[in-house]
Image (cartoon, rainbow, N blue to C red):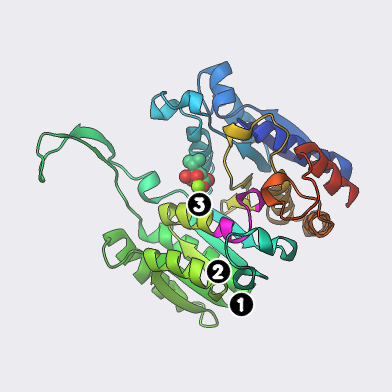
Amino acid sequence: MQKKIAVLAGDGIGPEIMRQALKVLRYLNLDLQIEEGLVGGAAYQVFGHPLPKKTLDMVSTCDAILFGAVGDWQYDALPRELRPEQAILGLRKAFGLYANLRPAVCYSALASSSTLKPELISNLNLLIIRELTGDVYFGTPRGLRPSPDGEFPGAQEGFDTMRYSQPEIARIAHTAFKAARLRKNQLTSVDKANVLESSGLWRSVMSEIALQYPDVALNHIYVDNAAMQLVKNPRSFDVIVTGNLFGDILSDLASMLTGSIGMLPSASLNQHSFGLYEPIHGSAPDIANKNIANPLATILSMALMFRYSLAMDEVAVRIEKAVNQVLAKNIRTVDINNTAHPSVSTEEMGDAVVAHL
Ligand code: IPM
Ligand code: MG
């Protein structure tokens, strides 16, 4: 049966980077159906909600979601449940996309674009696996209230609940151990077990599941130490598995090791390999509509879609090869341009990838 892709471009630079991914997709001329829908601020403008039912219904009939980015300062004053970010959180929850894969690969042509010394990051290739539907992101209760106790009783306080259940940890553990098996059989679990109850459980479940994967070496480190080691010696890691909040922070950190946040794709999967594919950078409203944003993370996210949701690995490889060749030819958008050549525009980068397919 013909596969169907939901394309949700969103806000800020979302539409312009998505146009480049679609250009690549059209050139590939595959037997796929594409449905476009509104999310984020763009959906709020039309439907008064960042994740309208119309979009959700459309997505439910698809095999994968290709997602741009959401968010814009103009929505900052809206109540939290109407802000653009709720679209991405809502999609993660609605489709149970608990496994977020964020590969951080340093293309050799870009080693000198990183703020770290090239000798520390050349050939860096690590995979962050972030749990995506639990933790303090979704834990209840949460809210605002007069403080019931503590140093300032009665004062206004904001509170959230960091929580993980045993099965939630176990399923992401299996994802991580399986991913480690396909790489170097080395897995680092990141937590804050010296302080947090949820992390204490995280650590013990990881160790328990490890018994089923005796061929994979598991080590545990605290998140503060992980942040330090990622900057100090990033190549000491291969696969990292961590919770939602720590993964959010560490994956941004890891992206900069590779030279630019504009390069990193991600896949968010449920147990049926239905997935949402998005660049890890945000909507970057400050550079929107200037035709300078880097579309490569979106194009590489599309490659992941072919790999994980559509079982078309050969197409993924073809796209990744084309991106590599473009970079090797010093074709760069401004965010990754460490060469003497002038930077290319968003459109030109899309064209260059097509030309190298
Ligand atoms: C990410 C983003 C999101 C997150 C935001 C937009 C809700 O930062 O995908 O990393 O925090 O998960
Ligand atoms: Mg983030």
Q: Residues within 10 Å of mark 1 (few under 14, many from 20)?
A: few
Q: Nearer the viewer, residue 128 or 94?
A: 128
**Disc 1 or 2, which lies upstream in sequence?**
1
Q: Which residues are magenta?
A: 254-263
Q: Quadrant of residue 186?
A: bottom right
Q: Which residue is mark 1?
A: 184
Does the magenta portion include 257? Answer: yes
Q: What is the three-letter code of the residue carrying label 3?
A: Tyr
Ligand 1 lies under 8 Å from the Cβ of mark 2: no
The residues tagged by marks 1 and 3 sit, at their Cα atoms, a distance apart of: 23 Å
- Residue at horizontal 35 percent and vertical 71 percent from the top: 204
Q: Residue furthest bottom?
A: 215
Q: Position of residue 205 (x, y in %)?
A: 38, 68
**Disc 2 or 3, which lies upstream in sequence?**
3
Quadrant of the image containing the N terminus: top right
Does the CB distance between marks 1 and 3 fall below 8 Å?
A: no
Q: Nearer the viewer, residue 317 or 330?
A: 330
In the image, is 72 to the left or to the right of 279?
left
Q: Which structural element holds mark 1?
A: loop
On screen, residue 76 above or below 357: above
Main secondary-structure element of the magenta-colored stretch: helix
- Residue at horizontal 56 percent and vertical 34 percent from the top: 70
The residues tagged by marks 1 and 2 sit, at their Cα atoms, a distance apart of: 8 Å
Q: Which residue is mark 2?
A: 239
The residues tagged by marks 2 and 3 sit, at their Cα atoms, a distance apart of: 17 Å
Q: Nearer the viewer, residue 332 or 217?
A: 332
Q: Residues within 10 Å of mark 3 (few under 14, many from 20)?
A: many
Which label is found at residue 331?
none
- Numbered disc in front, either 1 or 3: 1
